[in-house]
Image (cartoon, grey):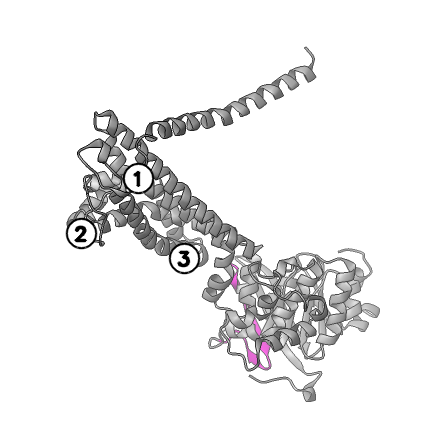
Amino acid sequence: MSVVTPSNEGARLLSIAGLNAYFGPTQVLHGVTLDIAARRVTAVIGPSGCGKSTFIRCMNRMHELVPGARCEGAVRLDGADIYAPEVDPVALRRRVGMVFQKPNPFPTMSVRENVLAGLRLTGRRLSEPEDAVVERTLRRAALWDEVKDRLAAPGLSLSVGQQQRLCIARALAVEPDVLLMDEPCASLDPIATAHIEDLLSTLKATYTIVMVTHSMQQAARVSDETAFFLNGELIEATHTDALFTAPRDRRTEDYITGKFG
Amino acid sequence: MSAAASSSRGERGLLAACVFAVAAPLLVLSVLVVGVVVQAAPHLDLEFLLSGPSRFADRAGIYPAALGSLALIALTAALAVPVGVGAAIYLQEYAGRGRWARLVETNIATLAGVPSVLYGLVGLEVFVRAVGLGRSLASGALTLAMLALPIVIIAAREALRAVPHELREAGLALGATRWQMVWQVVLPVAAPGILTGIILATSRALGEAAPLLVLGAVVFVSDPPTGWSSPFTALPLQVFQWASRPQEAFAQAAAAGIVVLMVTLLMLNAAAIVLRDRARRRGA
């Protein structure tokens, strides 16, 4: 497994070409081609039902878990096709972590167990004590100071915003290269949202982040690159500043100026 | 009569009907329980619990039947729980929604409604005769396990279905295999519900007399079972046998047997509820 080193910062870690995705007979993504920069936050925006979530779920092969769902085209992680027959989707998902819309800590597990869940689930041997992993990961998710005294409390006893950061910690503990976030702030209040946004700006030093968001303001605040989807097509993708100040496509302009959406 | 008055009369009528619907079965139940306990009282003592059956009603005891029932239930659960929970996991987490899965599902629902006498007939033909286990504890447990199996499967499936889909996704997204996800994420969340299903199924099996009678379980057994191949009797059978005797003293013994059966059931349920709550507290 190759690791992205600072020397190829700005390189393209994920490269998607001609991606079509389907739910049964319905095509939801049409020929999406997009390169995603390493160690940047890429925001995926667009109106509801435009295929944003499906798009990121194709990158950790979660899309195909829905009965009848499939996709075709190329998705390359570090140059290797993740849909190649020899690729084990289970192993892939350890490299490409995911955070969901609704915080979903495991209800039978404590805060600590939730952090370690990914490692324990997959039966991985740790090279360092569990406590060290828990502390480092929770610090990275900006949650340590708030929960260090109640690591044994159930994960569900935290506030919703803390739960979402716990879910981020859970995903980080597996040491992925890419972090996919599917509207991670959709069920959070503004303060909790601000926590997550702050966190993103530090996480991108280490991880490549692809975030679906409903909020254009959020995309403008936290992302480096933005991709605008409409009806399953990628309309425009470029630097966030450029996309919001000088959109090249008429439809992008209409969307970001609120003419529809 | 104004509309408001008539609707409030209707309201009160409905409330009265509901109260009656709750009170009637409670009344019947308490009359039954009190009746049985009163009848059992003269017979119910330590000696009754610790001695075997006898031709003489005042010496007849429940010991072999009680131990027989316990052994029967333990074996039944040991057989039906792993198979039933395994089947439920397969159907809910792996089988998908194909025609085959639906066929199996319909069959299981039908089996859960099959009269227990039929299970006795199958048990007699298959376990007692074909397999050659005879009228043994093993035959009885296998037969009762068949009877309990569909109940366990259906209840366990319900419990698994109630586990939010997001938790499965979260597990898989962490790089867990389907089995790791089911075993460590889904099952702990579903455990209280599965446990409830197991209680229901074993309680049902504990109270069954018909299939065991068909199976030819011996009713007059003076020693508790010593192994899976030994002859056995069970609480409901012992009660059935005493109740069919004309003497009043045996009727008292039957009542006492019923009390023992009831207390055993209650204890079983209480234990399971404690277990379930512990699992749930861990969950919540």
| Residue tagged 3 | B90
**Callout 3 secondary element:** helix
Q: Is residue B198 visible?
A: yes
Using a 10 Å C-alpha cutoff, classify the residue at mark 3 as few (fewer than 14 neighbours), some (14 to 19) or many (20 or more).
Answer: some
Which segment did they paint magenta?
Answer: A65-84
Whether labels 2 and 3 share one chain: yes
Q: How many marks?
A: 3
The residue drawn where x is 31% and y is 40% is B46
Quarter occupied by residue B62? top left
Q: Position of residue A201 (x, y in %)?
A: 75, 74
Q: Would you place residue A155 above or below residue A79 in this image?
A: above
* Residue B208 tag number: 1
Position of the N terminus of chain A, as image quadrant, is bottom right
The residue drawn where x is 61% and y is 20% is B12
| Residue tagged 2 | B133
Quarter occupied by residue B237? top left
**Callout 2 secondary element:** loop
Mark closer to the chain start, 1 or 3: 3
